[in-house]
Every structure is written in C-alpha cells, then in structure tokens.
Image: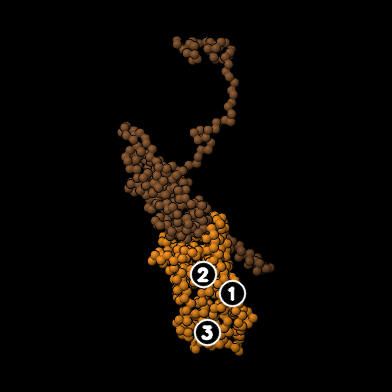
Chain colours: A orange, B brown
Amino acid sequence: MTGSTHLPVGAEAIRDKGYWLAYRFLILRRLSQAFFLSLFLLGPWFGIWWVKGNLSGSLTFDVLPLTDPFIALQGVVAGHWPEMTALIGALIVGAVYALIGGRLYCSWVCPINPITDAASWLHRKLDLPKGWQPKRGTKYFMLAMVLGVSVLTGTVAWEFVNPISMLHRGLIFGAGFAWALVIGVFLFDLLLARRGWCGHLCPVGAFYGLLGSKSLLRVTTQKRAACDDCMDCFAVCPEMQVITPALRGKDADTPLILSPDCTNCGRCIDVCAVDVFHFTHRFDETPAPGRVRDRTNPAPKVGKAA
Amino acid sequence: MSTQPKNPARRRFLQDAARGTAGCAVAGMTLAWFVQDARALPDRAIRPPGALPEDDFLAACIRCGLCVRDCPYDTLVLAELGVDGAATGTPFFTARDVPCEMCEDIPCVAACPTGALDKELTDIDDSRMGLAVLIDQENCLNALGLRCDVCYRVCPVIDEAITLERRHNERSGHHAIFMPVVHSDHCTGCGKCEKSCVLPGEAAIKVLPIRVAQADQAEHYKRSWEENTPLVDEIIDLPDRLPGTGTDNLAAPGGFEPTFKLPQGATTGGIGQ
C-alpha cells in the first residue's frame, strides 16, 4: 500500500495527465450515451425522423432495422417467431456487440448507466457501506429466470419491468410512472447495494456480457509492472473483480481483461496516473511483464509525491 | 455437532445453486405475478388493426412504438406505466379520443417489425379491432325516436356495419324509430361511431373488444333459416293410426263411444264437423 492510496480517486491522474486525459473516457461515454439518446429524440422533439422507435426496436433512415436481441430472444421462447425485419435487426445488433464488445452496450449506450454511475459517485462521496453484494453469478440466474418466466407466461416478460426500456421509452414516448422504477434503481444502488443493479442483477447486462464473451475490444494492463497500488482503478471500476487477474498476473498471465463482466467503460484508463491500462484487441500479445514485488524491490514510485 | 464437510467446494456449489434457485423462484414468481396482472387488457383499450389475439400479442410485441410513429392520425399511443391499463409500452387507442381512420395502406401494420400486427391483413375492411355496441339504448337519440344518425353516417362501412332499422315508435304511436344496428360481419371496430356520438361525456355506442362484445354461437340450436337440412336424417315413418277397435277415432267404424256425454253440439268430437 502506498501513500497514493489515500488520495482522492483520480487526483493523481488529474495532476499528472491533466483534466482531459483523466476524464477522457467518462466524457466520451457521456457523449456517446447522449448521442444515442438524442438520435431517438430528434424525431419527437424536432421532427427530424432519422431514427424511429426506441432501443427495443428501431428503424434508421427508413432502411436499417435494429432490434434488441435479448427482447427478440424472449419473444422466441415465449412462442412467437418474429418476422424477418425484427430478426435481421436482432442479428445486426447481436453481431455488432458480439464482435466489438458485449457490455459496451452497458457503458456506452444504456440510458440507465448515468443513473447507476451517479448513484455510485454519490455512494463514494457519502462513504456509505457497500451493503448487499449478491454473488457474481446472480445476474445469470436472473437471466435464466427471465427466460423461464417468458416461456411460462408466453410474454416478453422482462419488458414489463425493464428499467432501461421504461426510461428510454419514457423519454421518447411519455413516461407515466416509469420514473419510479428509475428512481428505484438509483436508490437501490445508493442505499441497498453498491453497484448492485447493473453488475449483479440486470439480466440485460448479463445477456450482453455472454454475447460478447469472445469480443474483440479489450482493456489491457500491459504496463502492469508500473502499477503503484493506488487502487484508483478498483475504486472506479463498476466490475472491479475483472481487473485483478490481469493486473496482478505474473509474466505468463495475459494482461488482457477478458472477463465478460468488463463493460469497456475505460474509467480505469482515465484514473491510472501511470498509464497501466489502454484499449486493445483480444489478440494483442505484446509482452507484459508482471510486477516483481518483495521487500527488496518495493513498488516503483512513479507519482511525483504522495 | 459441526464437522468440516469432506468436499468444501462441492458443499459451496450446492449451497450457492440452492440459494440461486430459491432466489430465482421468488423473483420469478414476483415477475410472473406482475406479468399476469399487467396482461389484463382494459376493455376501453383497443389494439391496432391486425393485432394478434392478446396472448399472442404479448409474446410478439417488442414495444418499439414504430406503429405509433407511422400512424398518420396520432391514433395509436404506447401505454404508460400506471397511467394506461394496457401492458406498459404496448400500442393501443381510445376510440372516444382518437378513432382509427382505417388507412387503406395500413401503415401501422407495415411498420411492425415482429408481426405482432399481422401482415396478413391487407384490406383494412377485414380488420377486427373491436366491435361497436349500442350500449346505452336509453339515451341514444335515435333510440328515443329522434333523428341523430351520426354514428350511422360517419361509419366508414356505412349501410353494412351500421344500418338503421325502422321500428314502430310505441311512445308516440305513429312515428318511426330508426334504430342503429351494428353488424359484426362488417364492423371493423375503428371507433368512429363512438368518437362522433353526440352525447356529452360517454358515448351511447362504444367499441368493445370482441371478446367482450360478442357471445359464442349456440351451436346446438339449428338455424333453419340458414341451413335447410332437416333435424333428422330421413323422414321417420310412424305407424298410421288406422280406424278400428280400441282407437279414439270416433268417426270411423269400430270407434268406441265414451261413457260420458259431452255438452250438446260436441257429441261427435272433432273430426268431420
């Protein structure tokens, strides 16, 4: 443990790299989320109908159909084989996320992400106890449960409660009391379970994680030898368990973060003052020596002072 | 007495699996209850043209709202949570607010990516969104003997879906009542009659879901005016009642005389009088 452990999260990165590099991916992600939302809002707000529909299903420029593959899957198990338009849309979306990065959806597109990020930020500011932490496998049980209920009730079951659809559709078509669910997720993450919803329970995230388990875009800890144990990456990472195998790996272990839980949010890259992390592809085999740590070789003091 | 399990990993796996399954069962039952609760479609929410039967519809509709977007008259809306009774995010319309204008190209059906609105529907006159019912025959102006006729006149399938049936006006004794009568074989359930009913507030004629508006046919009653087949397969030749001893055929020889006398004029019974 080094002195920099006690600095506020990201303080070193801001000091060493500047504000932009220390918040680059956070800002880009917020822009991406705003971009995808605004595409859908251009129509209802300004009458520019480039994109019609919502995240469940949409039509872009009157030619490109897109469908949420998880919703399409629920429909299929519920007993309705969708028409070609929806199938093609689901295949396109599924292929893109399977190829690039499954939970890219979670951190770069999903409208609930800013909500749970805000809850997490406030949680850290208020220094609240982490609360209920369901096991990592819980979301897969949730996924199985949703598909099971879809089969049993013959409905697209998750869409009766899905806070993502509720929020997104609410913004585009009118919300009703959908806000209550969104506030519920925020309060759940803030008071009951730190990072509880997206990482532990949401079956949509679980689905996209499985979908992208072999996807290309990966964060690597290639310069892990430079890690000074400031722990900032663990503090900002919504799925902190994915970092350890790569960051703490020995020479022979891959520096790539290969867990399907990683959302490719890039916050670890932002907050690392010594640039351990960067984006790469899953076939990147650049050698990445692990850290050598013992009493005679303490952690390198890369930061100027701490 | 507590002992260390022989195989802690197995013990942990079994415990986790049991806990996960139990959690799933609880969450699943909650979700299933919620789904079951939310799938009850209110009678005033009319699904778009070509919508599959409600059970199939909820398996097919992904709630994307593309039908709503392509509806040129803003008839269709997506149900909002806790505001509208239909399942959240599914399309419906309220006939008294904005009825279906029955576009010939049926853009809502064309827009549906999943087939929740059935592409088999190519002629809007074949759609059966619901069925109009003259539900308040006490306040309907035509039923009172006045000439309103508005529902009849706005009907896109005029003279087929709604006809005016002439009846005798018992109240005045010498006027007619022009009673609007809906015919289910032509009514599409578009709701234009309900929308334009001149009564303030609720309409006297309302579009209801077919499941509410229409009864099942009584299959076990023959409709002789529709099918000409006799009740029995062939004519049964019952034995003729021949005159003779022991019968009540008084006019025939061998008939017996009753022991009592009928009043005068009826002594010989019915036959031959």
Q: Position of residue B52 (x, y in %)?
A: 50, 52
Comparing labels 2 and 1, the label whose residue is closer to the camera: 2
**Mark with earlier residue (2, 3):** 2
Q: Is residue A33 visible?
A: yes
Q: CA distance from mark 2 to mark 1?
A: 16 Å
Of B67 and A62, the residue lying toward us = A62
Read off the chain for label 2.
A
Q: Residue furthest right?
A: B6
Q: Is residue B63 above or below residue B257?
A: below
- Residue B234 is drawn in which quadrant? top right
Output the chain of dot 1: A
Q: Position of residue B73 (x, y in %)?
A: 39, 56
Give the side of residue A176 with respect to residue B118, left or right.
left
Residue B138 spot, x, y in % from top left: 35, 40
Residue position marked by numbered label 1 in the rendering: A258
Q: Are marks 2 and 3 on the same chain?
A: yes
Badge 3: chain ID:
A
Q: Which residue is the site of mark 2?
A: A105
Which residue is nearer to you in this view: A24 or B157? B157
